[in-house]
Amino acid sequence: MPFRPSPEIHIRHLTGFDATTGQFPAGLFPQIRQALATGMAQLDQQGMGADNVTRITFTLRETDGFSTCFPLLNDLFGRTCPATTLRLVKQFERTGQLAEIELVALPTQADDTLS
């Protein structure tokens, strides 16, 4: 049987940077919300959505305030419960950045049977 590579989509380096202000919002929640909105828009361009996400990696400078993101995460991913990794870093390169997100998504296959 020939090896077929996975058609996974990786969306990396999602941050809460606000292009209209040229800054990062002060809190973790608005940065996570902005990063996820950007990620969902990129998935939409690929014909996918939150239901296609199989893994989320959060890279955070600190965990204070992360629990305020749970309702947002539950709204987006509560039905599918993607695997989640939380990484901590001492600092990001950009001043004011508190988080970075990576999404891994798998397109829905019309025929999931192996041939």
Image (spheres, grey):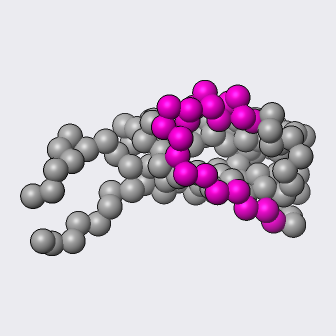
Please tell me whether residue 114 is drawn above or below residue 74 in the rendered image: below
Horizontal relation, residue 96 to residue 7: left or right: right
Tell me the residue at 79%/62% (across/down): 88
Residue 85, picture quadrant: bottom right
Residue 36, picture quadrant: top right
Can residue 23 be seen in this snapshot? no
The magenta segment: 69-89
Tell me the residue at 29%/66% (across/down): 5
Horizontal relation, residue 58 to residue 89: left or right: left
Is residue 83 shown in magenta? yes
Q: Residue furthest bottom?
A: 2
Point out residue 73 in the picture as x, y percentages from the top left corner. 65, 35
Tell me the residue at 68%/53% (across/down): 58
What is the quadrant of the C terminus in the image?
bottom left
Can residue 4 be seen in this snapshot? yes
Point out residue 19 in the picture as x, y percentages from the top left corner. 73, 40
Is residue 75 shown in magenta? yes
Question: Which of 5/82 is in front?
Answer: 82
Q: How many numbered markers are drawn?
A: 0
Point out residue 27 in the picture as x, y percentages from the top left corner. 87, 39
What is the quadrant of the N terminus in the image?
bottom left
Please tell me whether residue 80 is drawn above or below residue 90 in the rendered image: above
Point out residue 2 in the picture as x, y percentages from the top left corner. 15, 72
Tell me the residue at 55%/51% (across/down): 83
